[in-house]
Every structure is written in structure tokens, then in C-alpha cells.
Image (tube, helix red, strand yellow):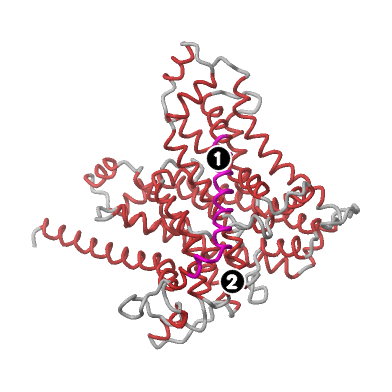
Amino acid sequence: MRHERIKYFFLLPAVLYVLALAIFPLLTAFVNSFTDIRFGSTKATFVGLTNYIKPFNDYRFYNSLYVTLILTVIAVPIELGLGMLLAVLVNRDIKGRNIIRSILMIPLFVSPIAFALMGQVIFYEGGGGINGILKDLGLPPIRWRSDPLIAKFTVVLSDVWMWTPFAFLITLAGLQAVPRDLIEAARVDGASEYQVFKNITLPILTPVLLTILFFRIVDTLRLFEVPFTLLGGGGPGIATETLTVYIYKIGFRGFFFGEASAVSFIYLILVAAIISVLFQAVRKFYV
Amino acid sequence: MSKSASIKKDKLIKDVVTYVLLAIFLLLFIFPVYWTFITSIKIAADTFTSKFLPFLQFQPTLKAWLGQMEVTENFKALLNSTIIGISSAALATLLGSMAGYALARFRFRRVRNIDIISWFLGLRILPPIALALPFYALIASLRLLDTHLAVILIHTAFFLPYAVLVSRDAFRSIPIEIEESALVDGCSRFQIFFRIALPLIAPALAAVFILTFAFSWNEFLFAFVLTDRIAVTMPVYIAGTVTTVGVLFDILSVRAMLAIIPPVILGLLVQRYIVSGLTMGAIKG
């Protein structure tokens, strides 16, 4: 095509913007991660790999790693499974599909902070929310926010509420892209519903499910708002202290920018590793 | 029983199971929002009970809503969120649609198009907290802490990849012939972009704008780190509510409703575009 030069005029503003405001700060952080810089002080000494070694001697780092991974490992499959189930149900020939779809979409637009606020009422242990209903039914209250184990469950439940609609909507779009006549032809040839699902629907759906997994894993690994606000800074104790909450505390409570940056990069490497391992494993499985 | 009767019976059972399951899930997914809403129209004493049917079980009241209408901080936070949301959505939509056009209509050689696209998609895995620290230092050194501009700048950077990838998809779906004949007629690339291509993808562009607005409206970490008193957005403000309001659940619920109503309404307006918006065009909706 002609006008070779002008294409840069269209592309570069966005690229430069992201470089200046995301990549440049990230590079600064990388440099900082090798120093003992603290916010507000002008002095910074090179400390080598100290900041990268320090977390590995801190039990809270391991704890936040564990919390983050366990929440991801539990929440994401539930969201994927429930989302698929809902998509299959809504994709059937049912009445009121559009209204059901709209209602299920609502949680996607509720900010995690607003949910954390709603959670103050819903998970209030003295009654009013779920515990109030349990009391009416003659059941004992649940310690949603004060029991270390149940608090993790509360975070999972919140994430499932907020993000199952994501898995649902995208799976539904994928299901609607499966050609109907292909399925009908298979049925005429005597294929069972299970065979149709396994041999036609699932292969077509695979990229869709991988996309959901990608976005959900990336987002769950950065979980912050609900543990931070609803559970009071990753509480009780440090039971729901995710990596992001942990880094936040080092960086913005202690202002140890160097150390916090180092942990951020360890975290970034972890995310990249998980994503690439996932894609390798899944590719082998399907191709 | 004849075969067709048994197929009919089979379908009936499946239908019943479908509707029952859907009803249960709909109730579960609507529960938190419904509960927050009814809590906002209860008198304080009722907020600790599980009464959930207004008029039948409890007398609804607008007391908390009317009381909150007099709290200026509510409006300040709503206004801040609106200013920041509109500005960053406009900036992201403009820059994003330009880059999306370039990626849809031109071929880049030194760095191939697919690599540029992957780069934008790859930005999605950057942890916000990793950006928040250096960005805070940058904004502090520019003496821009607690300004609208600070939040607008970072929100635009963070949501720009969405705008690029979704608008690229939209441009690719419109025929190139109109633009080519305009080029033959002597139109400049800018005229073609602003007068022909952009209007053709107006619906998708509106969706990009609205979704970016909603993302910005709901974003917490950056806004929380960068603002303090003047430029606080709705999420930052209501997060503070937890400590200042405590267990005044009726007030808490009014503020939660104020935070969720605008993005939910906007989101439902553009639901047709949501799938490509949420997956950055990786899956067609």
C-alpha cells in the first residue's frame, strides 16, 4: 500500500504513550530493585541481589505466594466450570434468554471495591446477611471474616460471583459460533449428545476456554481489593494476604521501594512462567 | 409409549432441569445486589435482620438515600470518577483507534503487525502493583499527586491496549474498498480516517469508550495510591467508608449502590460488544 510513512503517525502515539507511562516506570522499578531506595529519600545505594534474596527468608512472602496460588487454583476452575454450565443451559432453546443473559452480566460491572462494601453487610457475622438467613433456618453462623480458613473461602466466593459471568459470556459466544447444521448432521448419523460435545463442540470451544483461562489466571494472581478491604488488609492475620497486598504493604506502608520492586519482578516472572507452562501443557494435550 | 412421545418426555425433563437450575443460579447471582438494595431502604435496626421483602416484612424508607443526598463528599467522588472516566476513555479511544487503524490497514515490516499486537496483549499480564510503585514516584516528582491528571494518565496507559485491539478488530470487519476509492479520489489518509473509517465503526467505538469508562470508574489500586483528598474516585471514597461508617449498613449500602449503578447501566447498554471488549478481541463476540 502507498503512504508508507503515514502509518507511523497512526501507530506511534499509542506505542509511545504506553512506553512512557508503563514501560519506562517499569524499567525504573527494575533499576530500583537493586538499590535500597526508600520513597522520600534521595539516597540510594546499590545493594546487588539483596532485595531478591530477602523475600526468600521471609515467611510472609511464602505465605502470600501460597495464598495467591491456592485462591487461583480453587477459584478459576469453579468459575470456568460454572460459566460453562450456565452457557450450555442458556444456549438451549429457552424463553427469556436475553433477560437472563443481561442479569448474569451485572456482576461484571460491579467494582471489586463495591463488592467488598456489599460484603460488609452480606458476610456480617452478627446477622443481617447470610448469617441472618442461617439463623432463621436454625443453622449456626459462619465465621466468614474471622476464621483464617473460611476467610479464604469468602475470597473465593466473592471472586466466583464477580467473574463466573465472564466465563459464562465468553463460552456462550463460543457456543453460538458452533455451526448448528454440523451438529444436526452428526446427530442424524447417530452420534450421541456426549459424542457431539466431545468431538465437535469441545474442539471448537478450546481456544475460547484457553482465552478464559488466560485472563482469569492473570487476574486472580493479582487479587487485591476483596482481601484488602473486606478482610482488612489480608486478614484475619495474614490468612488472605495475597502477593499484591504483601507488596503493597512493603511499598506503601514501609516505603521500601527497592524491596517492593524486587518482589514485583519475582511476581512478574511467576505470572509469565505460569502462563507459558499452561499454554505448553494445553497445546500438547489438544494438538 | 411411541418413540416421539418418549422424545417429547425426554425434552420436557431437560427443560424442567434447565429452568430450575437457571432459576437457582439467577437467584444466587442477583442476591448480593438485591440484598444491598433492600439494606439501603431499611431503617438502621432492620439492617441486622434477614427481612428481605419490603412492605411485607419491613417498612421501606428513603431515609438513608435522602440523608446521603446531603453529603457533599458523595457528589465530589462521583464527579471525580466522571471526570477521570470520561477523560481517560476519550484519550484511550482516540489513541487506540488510531493505532488500531494502523494495525488493520498497513503492514509494518521491521516489527511485524502480529508482534505489535502480541506486545499490546502482553501488557495485560503486567501486575498493576508493579506499575503502581514507580508510577507513584514519577507522579510525586512531577508534584501531581492527588490530581485528576495523575489518575487519567495511568488509567489511559493501562486501558489503551483494550482500545487498540478492539478497534483494530472493528476496522478489519469493514470493507476496505470504500477507503481505496476515496484514496483514488484524492482524499488524504487523515480525511479517510476521520470522515470515512471512524464513522463506519462508530458503534464499536462507542462501546470501547463506554467500557474504558467503566474500567476507569471501577479501578481501585492506582486511584487509591495516587489520590488522597482532592481527586478521590468513587472506589477510593467508598473504601474509606468502611472505616468511617462502620456498621451503619443502610448508609454503606446507599454508597455501594451509587458506585455500581452507573457502570452497570452503561455496561448493559453495550452488551453486544462486551465479549470482544473483555477478551481484547481475542474472541469474536
Q: Is residue B27 above or below residue A102?
A: below
Question: What residue sits 56% from the left and 30% below the top?
Answer: B98
How busy is the neighbourhood of tag 2: few (under 14 within 10 Å), some, or many (20 plus)?
some
Q: Secondary structure at mark 2?
A: helix
Marks 1,2: beta carbons within 8 A? no
Amino acid type of disc 1? Ala
Farthest residue toward the top? B185
**In this rendering, position of residue A67 left or right of residue B6:** right
Q: Is residue A269 visible?
A: no
Q: Secondary structure at mark 1?
A: helix
**Main secondary structure found in the magenta portion:** helix
Residue under label 2, please give it.
Answer: B242
Distance Cα–Cα, label 1 vs label 2: 32 Å
- Over which residues does the magenta segment extend? B67-94
Question: What residue sits 56% from the left and 14% below the top?
Answer: A2
Residue under label 1, please give it.
Answer: B90
Q: Nearer the viewer, residue B86 or B205?
A: B86
